[in-house]
Amino acid sequence: MLATSGCGTTQRAVTSADLFPLADTQAWTYAAPQREGTFTAAMSAGPVLNGAPSFRHGDPAGGAMVLQRTQDGSLVYLRHEFKSGTSYISFDEPLVWLPANLAQAGRMEQRAGFTHYTSDGSTDRGAVTYIIDFGAAANESVIAKSVSVLTVVHELAVRTETGPSITVQQTIRYADGIGPAGLEGQFLTVGENGNLTAGEPAAFELTAFTP
């Protein structure tokens, strides 16, 4: 079980809400060597989806993950909005980004269809296979604070009816009470001829967090 020490021998279980809190005041600033500077991922209020509020978590490309906390405490990924603001992917079923029960360390796999809504008003169908691999938790220093950190590998394999197949691989270190403390990621594209093209690897390390 992922847990942190309390007073004496008491321990508390760390939840997905501890590892990825949701509030529209939050911002994470990362050192981004490949950008020769920093990148800030801000959280903002998203649309009401499935009868509940959602949150937009900004990405380095100028788009945003649209996230929601379910009643059981899971963090789910509902759709992805692209930089234009008018083009997005909406999953037929929410993808569990982090489950409520983090004690189930191991591997999880989900499959879902999606609709891609484009800026010109057209739509495209596709499917995604999403795999999560949980690593071990360890105490680390994150922005000068010793906290419990869980390493998780997220892999999304996206297939569409008309475009290339794309796999996004991300290794994210989630810090208790802070959120994503570091990320390493890469895009892999499979062309129509079956050739694999690997994008430039990206790495981000947290330097500041605004709750």
Image: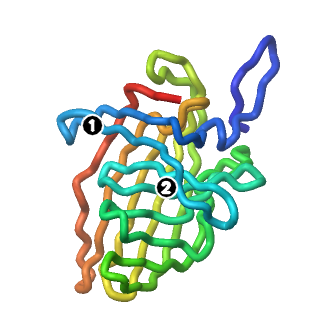
Q: As drawn, is 1 to the left or to the right of 25?
A: right
Q: Quadrant of residue 206?
A: top left
Q: Estimate how packed mark 1 is, as few (under 14), some (14 to 19) or many (20 or more) residues with alpha carbons within 10 Å.
A: some
Task: List the residue tagged with mark 2.
Answer: 154
Q: Position of residue 152 (x, y in %)?
A: 53, 46
Q: Estimate how packed mark 2 is, as few (under 14), some (14 to 19) or many (20 or more) residues with alpha carbons within 10 Å.
A: some
The label number, if any, that marks residue 32 in the structure image: 1
Residue 44 to residue 66: above or below? above
Residue at image point 63% right, 52% down = 75
Residue at image point 53% right, 55% down = 46
Labels in figure, total: 2
Residue at image point 78% right, 13% down = 7
- Between tags 2 and 1, which lies in front? 1
The label number, if any, that marks residue 198 in the structure image: none
Identify the amino acid type marked 1: Ala
Q: Position of residue 53 (x, y in %)?
A: 63, 55
Q: Position of residue 129 (x, y in %)?
A: 51, 71
Quadrant location, the N terminus: top right
Identify the amino acid type marked 2: His
Tell me the CA gap for discs 2 and 1. 20 Å
Residue 71 to residue 194: above or below? above
Tell which circle, 2 or 1, labels the residue nearer the N-terminal end: 1
Q: Position of residue 12 (x, y in %)?
A: 77, 28
Residue 16 to residue 146: above or below? below
